[in-house]
């Protein structure tokens, strides 16, 4: 199987930041075949860069994000952070050199301990880093203000806050570890519209001001378009297109990318409804042969059921994987 290369910039990835090479993740359950949720993906996130990862529910985005921070052990491939392999987490705490790699989870109601004051939870990272609990309390109050909340909120319990406020608290807790790369797994999906924009803008501001790499995982292409430098489009465990966000949005090449963008509602006064992509994502335990998208593809030919397309660089930093379009894609280099 050909790995899905999604490197941004030159073909040689930097030694700093997050890098996934030929990453595959499988799940096993009794009586069922192994589910290959991520099937050979390459991806990199450089310091200060915002990379959007988009796709339908069930395509493997969240699994990739958890493997990237060591919450899931890969079946194969390599995950590196600042040039060193990421150790899958066990019963012991994360190695000191990997504490700069942090994750913001989707559900702000489940990511905080309801029995502890939020200031204590934020200060944990300071204590683990060798600081005192008193120093941690001071940092917690500063970080709450940094994410737009009053410092006195540090003395409250999580149940006292709205979803958007909890997500800001979760981000403050991540910042206490002084990260250089953040994986944000659907961080705005559980929030209302106003909170979504607020949290997305907060993450973007932090990435720019602190030179933090950000892997922003979302099914909401409209948000990703606004904040991401580059975007990777994922379908059933593989990446089918990647490139600078504006270029992919304005001129998508893969049929799946076109379908996702066509499904985004537009307030343009035309009165036209979004175009629905027919069919559902296949069972990842029984993926289609050849191109995984071919059963739903409007331009599929017979060969698509047999040949797995490679992710071809057809313009600088632009890649797409489609056998039908391959003759029209001029490979770079």
Image: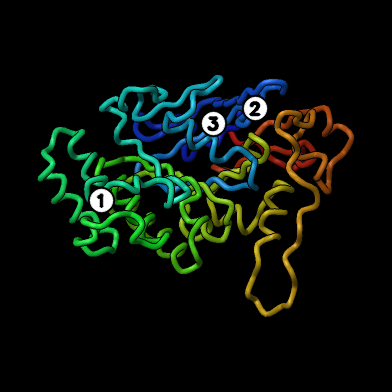
Which residue is labeled 2 in the image? 36
In the rendered view, tell whether residue 134 sits above or below residue 267. above
The Cα–Cα distance between marks 3 and 1, rounded to whole angstroms, is 39 Å
Whole-percent x, y for residue 324 in the image: 80, 40
Q: Nearer the viewer, residue 92 or 217?
A: 92
Towards the viewer: 98 or 48: 98
For residue 90, side relative to residue 155 (left or right): right
The answer to which quarter of the image holds residue 163 is bottom left
In the picture as drawn, the residue positioned furthest to the right comes out as 302
- Between the C-alphas of marks 1 and 2, the distance is 39 Å
Which x, y percent locates residue 174?
Answer: 31, 45
Do the CB atoms of the residues marked 3 and 1 lie less than 8 Å apart? Answer: no
Q: Nearer the viewer, mark 1 or mark 2?
A: 1
Q: Nearer the viewer, mark 3 or mark 1?
A: 1
Residue at numbered disc 3:
42
> Under tag 1, what secondary structure?
loop
Neighbour class for label 1 at 10 Å: few (<14), some, many (≥20)?
A: some
* Residue denoted by label 1: 117
Q: Secondary structure at mark 2?
A: strand
Of the numbered discs 1 and 2, the one sitting upstream in the chain is 2
152 shown above or below 5: below
Residue at the location (83% across, 48% down)? Answer: 298
Name the residue located 13 percent from the left edge and 51 percent from the top edge.
138
């Amino acid at each position: 199987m050909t790995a899905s290369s999604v490197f941004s910039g030159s073909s040689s990835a930097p030694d700093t930041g997050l890098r996934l090479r030929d990453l595959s993740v499988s799940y096993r359950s009794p009586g069922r075949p192994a589910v290959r949720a991520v099937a050979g993906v390459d991806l990199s996130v450089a310091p200060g860069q915002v990379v959007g990862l988009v796709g339908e529910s069930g395509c493997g985005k969240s699994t990739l994000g958890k493997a990237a921070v060591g919450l899931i052990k890969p079946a194969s491939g390599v995950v590196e952070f600042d040039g060193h392999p990421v150790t899958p987490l066990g019963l012991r705490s994360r190695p000191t050199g990997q504490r700069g790699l942090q994750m913001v989870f989707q559900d702000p109601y489940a990511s905080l301990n309801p029995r502890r004051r939020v200031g204590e939870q934020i200060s944990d990272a300071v204590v683990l880093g060798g600081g005192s609990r008193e120093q941690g309390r001071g940092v917690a109050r500063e970080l709450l203000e940094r994410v737009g909340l009053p410092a006195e909120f540090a003395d409250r319990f999580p149940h006292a806050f709205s979803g958007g406020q909890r997500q800001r608290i979760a981000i403050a807790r991540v910042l206490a570890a002084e990260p250089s790369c953040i994986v944000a797994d659907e961080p705005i999906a559980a929030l209302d519209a106003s909170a979504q924009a607020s949290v997305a803008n907060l993450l973007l501001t932090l990435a720019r001001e602190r030179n933090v790499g950000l892997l922003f995982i979302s099914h909401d292409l409209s948000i990703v378009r606004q904040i991401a430098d580059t975007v990777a489009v994922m379908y059933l465990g593989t990446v089918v297109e990647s490139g600078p966000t504006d270029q992919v949005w304005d001129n998508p090449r893969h049929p799946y990318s076109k379908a996702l963008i066509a499904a985004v509602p537009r307030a343009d006064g035309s009165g036209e409804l979004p175009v629905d992509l027919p069919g559902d994502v296949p069972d990842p335990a029984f993926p289609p042969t050849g191109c995984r998208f071919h059963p739903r593809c409007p331009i599929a030919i017979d060969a698509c059921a047999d040949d797995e397309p490679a992710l071809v660089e057809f313009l600088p930093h632009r890649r797409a994987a489609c056998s039908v379009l391959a003759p029209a894609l001029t490979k770079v280099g």
